[in-house]
Amino acid sequence: MIDIKKLATRALLATALATAAHGAAAQTYPARPVTWIVPFAAGGPTDALARAMADRMGRELGQPIIIDNSPGAGGTVGAAKASRATADGYTMLVGHMGYMGAAPALYKKLAYDPVKDFAPVFRFPDTPLVLMVRKDHPTKDIKALIDFGKANPDKLFISNAGVGSSSHLIAALFAASAGVKI
């Protein structure tokens, strides 16, 4: 025997779900603010570029893009945070070769999988890396810097964004190629 009450309840529920799904599909994206996770500290080059792009894109999309700086461990902290976000298009990660390419090779266990957890949406502009020395340093060109490094193996120091970051890997490549210790 057919239970009319159950059938009617199910039909109403199905109609309500279909109507809600149609209403959600009819919304234009974005219907609310979008968050970009920048896994570096505020004020750095990636943050500055993200903020400039977010400002312009937010105006064009008609919704603000909120920058969420989540630094730590060369960007892996922010990438892990982004991997746990709801996959609804409202939380995005500003990708970087350090935590998307190098970190999986450097760390045995990451809280995210760059291939399985993320999909590229658009290419973010590259930020150049520049080798600089203090103005009062005795070296004035790359040859003099390499010669100085070879003659003073414990006197060259570098700054970088963390293990596996592009600034770390480029400095290590430079040191290995030049035969100097940093």
Image (cartoon, rainbow, N blue to C red):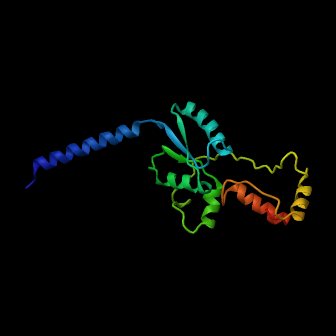
Observer-nearest residue: 99 or 2?
99
Name the residue: 42% across, 36% down: 27
The residue under the point 76% across, 62% down is 172
Name the spot of residue 102 as percent of width and height, x first: 65, 62
Q: Which residue is at a point 63% across and 53% down the rendered structure image?
A: 96
Depth check, front residue: 145 or 110: 145
Q: Is residue 34 above or below residue 112?
A: above
Q: Is residue 59 shown left or right of residue 43? A: left
* Position of residue 88 measured from the top left corner of the image (x, y, whole percent): 45, 46
Locate the C terminus and report the quarter of the image it occupies: bottom right
- Can you say which quadrant of the picture contains the N terminus? bottom left
Q: Quadrant of residue 68?
A: top right
* Tally of numbered tags: 0
Horizontally, residue 94 falls left or right of residue 45, namely: left
Give the side of residue 107 with respect to residue 89, left or right.
right
Q: Nearer the viewer, residue 96 or 156?
A: 156
Q: Is residue 154 above or below residue 119?
A: below
Picture coordinates of residue 181 (x, y %)? Answer: 81, 65
- Residue 159 locus on image (x, y percent): 73, 54
Q: Residue furthest bottom?
A: 108
- The residue that appears at 81% across and 51% down in the rendered structure is 131
- 2 horizontally vs 44: left or right: left
